[in-house]
Structures are given as structure tokens and as C-alpha cells.
Image (tube, rainbow, N blue to C red):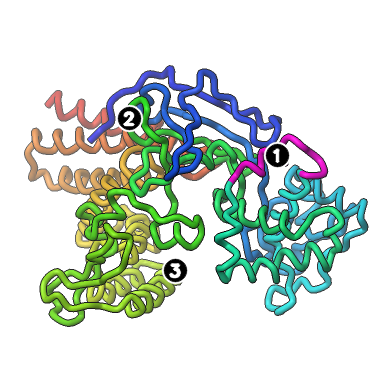
Amino acid sequence: MGRKKHSKKLSTAVVDENASAGDTNEEPKLYTCEVSPIFGRYLKSKVEIKKGTLILSEKYLVAGPMRSSGLICLGCHSEFRDNKDRRQCSKCSWPVCGEKCASSKFHVNECKFFMENKIPPPRVLDNNSETAFDFGAITVLRGLLLKLNNEHDWKLLQTLEHHSQVRKDLPLWEENVKNVVEPLGKRYELNKFFTDEEIHNVCGILEVNAFELGEEFSYRGIFPSAAMMAHECIPNATHFEDSKEGIIQIRSTVDIPPGTPITGTTQRRRMLVETKFFECVCDRCSDPAELGTNMSTLLCPKCRTGHVLNAKAKDKDILWQCSSCQAIMYPEEVDLLLDKYMSTAESTNGVRASETFLQDCSKYFHKNHFVPFGVKFNLCQAYGREKTPIQELHESELEKKLVLCQEVLEILDRVTPGYTITRGLILYELQATEILMSRRLFETRKFSKALLKRRLEGTVKILMEAIDILSFAHESTPEYAMAAAAKAETLIDLRRWINILKSK
């Protein structure tokens, strides 16, 4: 269905690219900051927020390489294809792509610090070496440098949760000691500036609060206001990014009533416990069937017909039990199955390989399970792009694409409803398939004019929603380009076609 038209007078809290780190510009503010024993500090809507409204736009406070990063450019965070691509910063000698990256706003502060304190780059720059430097430590250093350079921003960073007391008992703590605390504090002798406790705390702040940005190359960033969004596994807001400038925009994906927590999510219950250090108790996580989506449901290996669900999800416990024969699967057994297929899914590329993987998954997972679901999402876009253009797809492949898009969209409508990039991309693929099928039907001359007209009108609604969503992406992204082209060409052609059918 097409979305309701919205007023053009949406809140447009746009951040100047020259603004200070962490700055937002939100007048009038659409939210207040509240405190809850469950959420901690969180954002709550002050007024009704319509779907698609820009709630806030914020520049990074701290940004840099992902945790456990290998050798990368400290200016643009890209990986070097080979040693020929790698240059040394002319000032500090640390690795960059060239002079443009050497003067990047991401690198400038540590560059000055490295020069002033005569800190050389790592001796070993081989990613395969056991002694290779973890460039994720640079992001921690960038956070620590706020202590020396910007008292206001340092205090702001300290207001974010780091959960150090909880993290001390986890393997992650020792990894941070080895890869971050020891190299920065001892090897580079930075304990004269920062205590081990401060280094650990910044590690925790990044692990708990950071957003991942970037298309081809990823990096992480801290956005203090955005970090206060409460977690919800069926969120009412999402973020769009300008990864070049390090700015994210938070937009409502659905209508948000006054007095409602503004929520976002990128992870589920298991990951939240491991990385965000809290148990999610939302309606979706508390329901064994995840509100009927069955996104964690397995197929029973014993009776082959029943569904294996976590019968104790509501109690924040684990009991994988078949709904038909009552057989039990041990958590370790489930984890091994998930680890195996998640690993395979990450390396599965191409139409044929994806189809084979999904066929294999059908023996163990519900068709909506998150493991095959991710591959299905990618396959929706692969049909008509890999080797064979969509115009040349066989009728059977076109039908596969149509059914797959509808299947994926049905789940997205339930778990990430509204204006999300994932929905926008699937809507775009769906309308492209519908247009081609309608065109082939038209060419047969064996069609009902009224039926074809209704089908095309439905396709227009799908395309308009896709355009609305993808237009929120930054102008430099492929998603924005897709929306612009569709609005300038496809939408006009569709409406012209409908008018022709009306006149006959």
C-alpha cells in the first residue's frame, strides 16, 4: 500500500558539516530526555511525530576504525588493496591513502598528538601477523584525546554507559587488555596521559553505544543524542547516514504518539546480552514465535513436522522444544547449528549458490528464520542483476523474484515496519518485477484492460513508497540515485501508461 501524504513542513534538524562534534540542531525539539530503570536515559516524543519526520541530525563525537580492525587508512578508514596503495602521513608517518586523507578531519587530532609525542606507527603492518596492531585502538585513542583537547566533549563522552563492572568478567575485557589497553598504555607509554581505567571505559562506551557507518568500508561513531534511543526489536525510528561527513539522521519509521519512547535496533536478544549488556524484554523477544514471524524457529530433527521454539522466551530463559512431539534440543546443539549456517551465509554469493543454500536451510530452519532470511533479502536484489538483466529473465525466474520479494516484505512489515531502507529496497525490487510482468502481459494482447490498469495503479503506490523512503538516504548513496531516477523516469512512464489505458 502507498503511504499517506505528509506535510512538507517536517522537522528538518540539519547539522552544518562544520559544526562541532556531537552537535545537533533541532528546533523545535520533538523529544525530551527521560530516565528509566529499564532503559536508563532515553528519548521520549514530546509531540506526535509523523512517519518520515526527521527527529534529529547529529555529527559524531568520536569516530574511527571498527574494533579488531587490520591495517587501514586513518583518513577514510578504507583497507589498502596492496602495499602500493599505502602512503605515510607526511607529518606523523602513520598509514593513509594520500595527502587528502592525511589532512582528514578524522585523523588531524591524533596526527598532532603523534608528532608532539614522537609516537611512530606500528612496526608490524602485516594483518596476518600475530603481533599486528589492532587499528580499532585508534578509535579509543580519539575518544581519550578529548580529555586533552576538549573538556566539554570529554565530559559529554563520560555521560554514556560503559558497563565496565559487567565487562570485567567477560572474555572481551581480556581482548581489550591485549589489543588496546596494553598497546596504548604501555607500548606507546600513554599512561602518563590516560589511566587504564579511562582506556577501558572508552572501550566500553564504544562497545555499548557506537553506530556502524559506511558503505564499502565501515567505521564506528559515537552520537550522544542518537545513542539515547531506547532499544526495541520492532523499532519506531531508524537512522540514515552521511558517512563521508560522519553525520547520522534519525527519522521516524511510523507515526509516533506523544509520550512514546523513540526506539531503534540493530541487534537481537543474544547480541544485546553480549555487546550491550542487557536482556531485552520487548513483546517480540518474549514471544517464542516472535509475534508470529518465526524468525528464530527451527524444524524438529526428530518428528520432522513440528516447530522448535524457545518455550521459555518470556522468562528470559532457554528451552528449545518441539511444539508437536515435545522433543528437546540442547542450547549447545542450537548454537552449533546457527554458527555453522551463519558462517556459510556470510560467504554465500550469487543466485545459484544462494538458491542451493536456501534449499539446504529448508531442512533445519523455518522459512522465515533470520539465517535464510538474510540470504533471501540479498537474492531479491540479485535476480535480474547477476549475469542476466531483469529484462531477459525467464518467466519462472521473474516469478521467483516476485514471490521472494513479497515473502521478504511481509516479514519486514512486521519486524521493521514503515520507512526503513530495507523496506525501501525490497519495494523497489518488487515494483521493477511488477512492471516487467505487466509489460509482458500487455505484449500478449491477452489481458483485461481494467485488470491491467488496477495492477499498474498498485505498482505506482509501491514505487511511490519506495521513492519516499530511498529519498531520505544521503545524496551520495546508490539508494538516493535509485529514488531520483525512478521519480524522474519510471513513475512518469507508469502514469502515462495508465492514462493510455484509461483513454482506450
Q: Is residue 155 left or right of residue 52?
A: right
Q: Where is residue 203 in the image (x, y as percent from the top left)?
A: 65, 57
Of pointers 3 and 2, the one earlier in the residue sequence = 2
Q: Where is residue 322 in the image (x, y as percent from the top left)?
A: 17, 72
Q: Examine the rendered structure and indicate whether residue 261 appears above or below residue 183.
A: above
- What kind of element bears circle 3? helix
Assign the N terminus to one quadrant of the image: top left
Identify the magenta region.
Answer: 147-160
Q: Mark 3 points at which residue?
A: 346
Q: In this view, does 51 lie to the left or right of 105?
A: left
Q: Name the residue under label 2.
A: 255
Q: Where is residue 4 in the image (x, y as percent from the top left)?
A: 28, 26
Viewer-proximal residue, 225 or 407?
A: 225
Kindly indicate whether the residue at mark 1 contacts the one at mark 3 (C-beta within 8 angstroms). Answer: no
Viewer-proximal residue, 99 or 60?
A: 60
Local packing at callout 3 (Cα closer than 10 Å; few below 14, some 14-19, many 20+) is few
Local packing at callout 1 (Cα closer than 10 Å; few below 14, some 14-19, many 20+) is few
To which quarter of the image does residue 373 belong? bottom left
Q: Tag 2: residue type?
A: Asp
